[in-house]
Amino acid sequence: MTASPPSSRPEGVAAYTSGMFGVGGKTAVVTGGTSGIGLMIAEGLVRAGARVVVSSRKPEACRATAAGLGRFGWCTGVPADVSTPDGVAELEHAVADVFGGRLDILVNNAGATWGAPLERFPDAAWEKLVNLNLTGVFRLTVALLGALRAAGSAEDPARVINIGSIAGLRVTSLENYPYSATKAAVHMLTRHLAGRLTNDNVTVNAIAPGYFESRMSAFVFEDPQAKRALEQSIPMGRTGVASDIAGMVQFLSSRAGAYLTGAVIPLDGGVVDCT
């Protein structure tokens, strides 16, 4: 038996790859999309051909991010505080105006952390994190369900991607109690919503990132010795980079990820499952 010669039509490979992993032409909203992991996700989607709305509380950050990502494709910014009903309404109206009420991908990334000693942990900080990290995820997803249902089909469902954290999967030494609690709740909310929306052509999955360099984790990365110690504690020997999180979001948003729902995926170099 002789082997078939290599294909002389490499465009066939490109077409297959694009059909399996492409997100070109899809519409997306990325909350907290002007910095950190959210910006990594938004840039990846824009570069892959999606039309992306980035959102954060700061109007200038939204304008600057949209202008910067506009070099690579289609992007606009919508200022909104998704921890409030008014902010959620702003994004709901934007999806109707900008995308005609159809949304393929919702990335619930906006979040915050707060650390303080147990006995002195402020109530205001607890309430802030619950409203942003958890209630905002639920409220925005419900508000955009009509647009998600309108865009989804059995072959190509609409996607909700919630950004959790490995802090919601394992106990850390940091005294960030509402952060870990809300992220664990986001993981369970993901499973609950996934079960509810399976018949609506909407998948719901969560990514639980490990250590990525961002404004939220700057206190670790500013100290070279602490950074080296952190890298040594990760089985793969490094922290996450933009292509890691952008690639995972694109997988979940593409045909390749169409049959996955209710999953919580640790993206952490093996911290949760190998240590």
Image: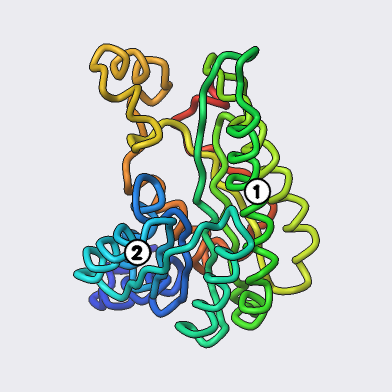
Nearer-the-camera pick, 230 or 217? 217
- 16, above or below 220, in the image: below
**Residue, disc 2:** 2
x and y, in percent, of residue 123 in the image: 65, 29
Q: Which quadrant holds the C terminus?
A: top right
Amino acid at pointer 1: Ala
Tell which tag, 2 or 1, sits nearer the viewer.
1
Locate residue 238 relative to residue 98 in the image: left or right. left
Placement of 196 over or under 19, stated as above or below: above
Q: Is residue 185 above or below residue 204?
A: above
Query: Based on the displayed image, in which of its 4 quarters is residue 259 positioned?
Result: bottom right
Quarter of the image that includes the N terminus: bottom left
Q: Residues within 10 Å of mark 2 (few under 14, many from 20)?
A: few
Point out residue 205 in the picture as x, y percentages from the top left corner: 62, 53
Q: Secondary structure at mark 2?
A: loop
Decide if residue 151 is in sight here: yes
Q: Is residue 115 left or right of residue 204?
A: left
Q: Which residue is label 1 attached to?
A: 263
In depth, the one of 82 and 239 nearer the eye is 82
Q: Along the polypeptide, which appears first: circle 2 or circle 1?
A: 2
